[in-house]
Image (spheres, rainbow, N blue to C red):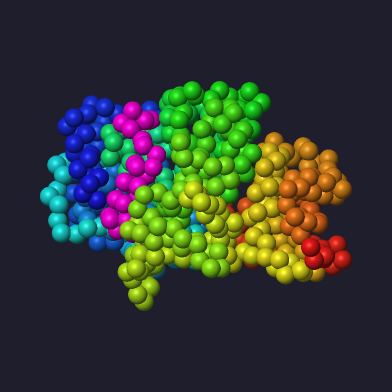
Amino acid sequence: MNFLLQALHRWSGERGDAAAFVHGEESISYQDLWRRVGGLAQTAAGLPDRVGLLAPNGIDWLTADLGLWANGQTMVPLPEFFADGQLSHILADAGIDTVLTTETGAARVRALGAKPVIIGRAEADMPKAGNRQGARIIYTSGSTGRPKGVLLGPEQLRHTCHGLLAAVHPTADDRHLSVLPFPMLLENICGIYLPIMLGGQVHIAASVLALPPLEMAVALAEAALRSQATTTVLVPQLLTAWVLIASVGRVEVPECLRFVAVGGAAVPPSIISRARELGLPAYEGYGLSECCSVVASNVPGGDKPGSVGRPIPGLDVRIADDGEIIVRGAPVMDGYLGAAKPNAARTWPTGDLGHMDDAGFLYIHGRKDNLIVTANGRNISPEWPETMLAADPRIGRALVLPAPGGGLASVLEPSMLGQAWFDGADNAALQKLTAGLCAGAPDYAVPRRTRSVAVGYFADNDLLTANKRPRRHAIVEHFSPWLAEIPQEETSYEFL
């Protein structure tokens, strides 16, 4: 990551007193960050070539990240939101016995059977660059609870960073509001690497994610106002929550916001539209860790509602005969840790289905292995009706499941503001809501039976992955008694 450290060194001289990162009452200038990274690099020089990092978002986390790059060591981010069983699997799979952490994280590291090394705040000269290049091993949470390690070297990260610079055009005047956890590669790139490359400023506000939903949305909006943020990266649930409280006048939207990237799951076009009406310039994108986080994004001046934008420079995207999205280019991973052969072709079949229009905009239909085959042989991506259902602000999460007879059923979890409506809704009201929201779909894609659950039900019943994506096979099994009660004639369809 010489390009990143070279940029940090440059700004430590040209903008040495400028605040690089602000975290609550703590801030660090470019000059001090350069020295602290040097201190961490000296501390870590005697550690193994492969080191784990377990820490909350903050200046300590990014200092450790940069210090390990300076040494050419391989770092494995350990997401705090992963369960202990998942972290134990990562440590064993990656062969890690040493973890950089904070004082508060040391006990958890010991309990996991690894040696904690406290991230210090000593300052020192940056060590001379050696021959090691360093790497990152990013573990995806997966739907089975057995994370897989994605191997990414400095070249993949460099290409993605430059691709985003060319697509989004961030500048040194940007103030990035960092909300998502740094172990999420997209936030690592957008919340640390790009600002350093440009000499910009980052305000870290990840603590908002620990709050209850309504408080979380208010804290997010207040953090954006306080920092006068120009850019941020959100998951759809956060954007929807912000839209809800802004719609009722609960919070003010900063006029300086110019780019709100949204990814991680499908975003209903109506949410994007409403966000922009409120002054939240939201742009949907698409990516996955195997392709170094970003494949495509809508951007100002290059935007189509319903799409995830055009591929970023440096990536070639094509659609296979069966509709699968295939990505090729320098940012594609080296392979999974432990794979028999490296991914020398830099080509990745994503497992996602989609299409591209004549203008080069990419549209996502859903996961290839999520397809539901209806009684009349139609292939339905459940994400299609789920996105229609999620357009209603009363719905926090919608899951569409295969029902007996080859039809569809849906389970709706209320949003933070929708519980009161659901409390008074009977089966007829639920079905009317479902049919109305899916009115734009053909008959065979509309769920014929709907039930609701309480707020937080999917998480409370371990039906989501660590990064809050549905564990679909577990969800179908969980609701199988209810699905079995649905008469087959209610879920069968005539050929159209």
Horizontal arrangement in the rendering, residue 347 relative to residue 321 (left or right): left
Q: Residue at x 79, y 63 (%)?
A: 496
Q: Residue at x 40, y 34 (%)?
A: 176
Q: How many marks?
A: 0
Q: Position of residue 374 (x, y in %)?
A: 74, 67
Q: Nearer the viewer, residue 244 or 93?
A: 244
Q: Position of residue 221 (x, y in %)?
A: 53, 29
Q: Position of residue 121 (x, y in %)?
A: 26, 40
Quarter-wise, where is residue 7 in the image?
top left
Quarter-wise, where is residue 35 in the image?
top left
| Span colored in magenta | 152-175
Horizontal arrangement in the rendering, residue 101 relative to residue 132 (left or right): right
Quarter-wise, where is residue 205 in the image?
top left
The reply to whether residue 306 is in sight is yes
> Is residue 478 a member of the stretch shown in magenta?
no
319 lies above or below 421? below
The reply to whether residue 61 is in sight is no
Q: Residue at x 78, y 42 (%)?
A: 422
Horizontal arrangement in the rendering, residue 398 relative to residue 227 (left or right): right
Q: Nearer the viewer, residue 98 or 340?
A: 340
451 lies above or below 335? above
Q: Position of residue 371 (x, y in %)?
A: 64, 65
240 lies above or below 105? above
Q: Residue at x 53, y 64 (%)?
A: 324
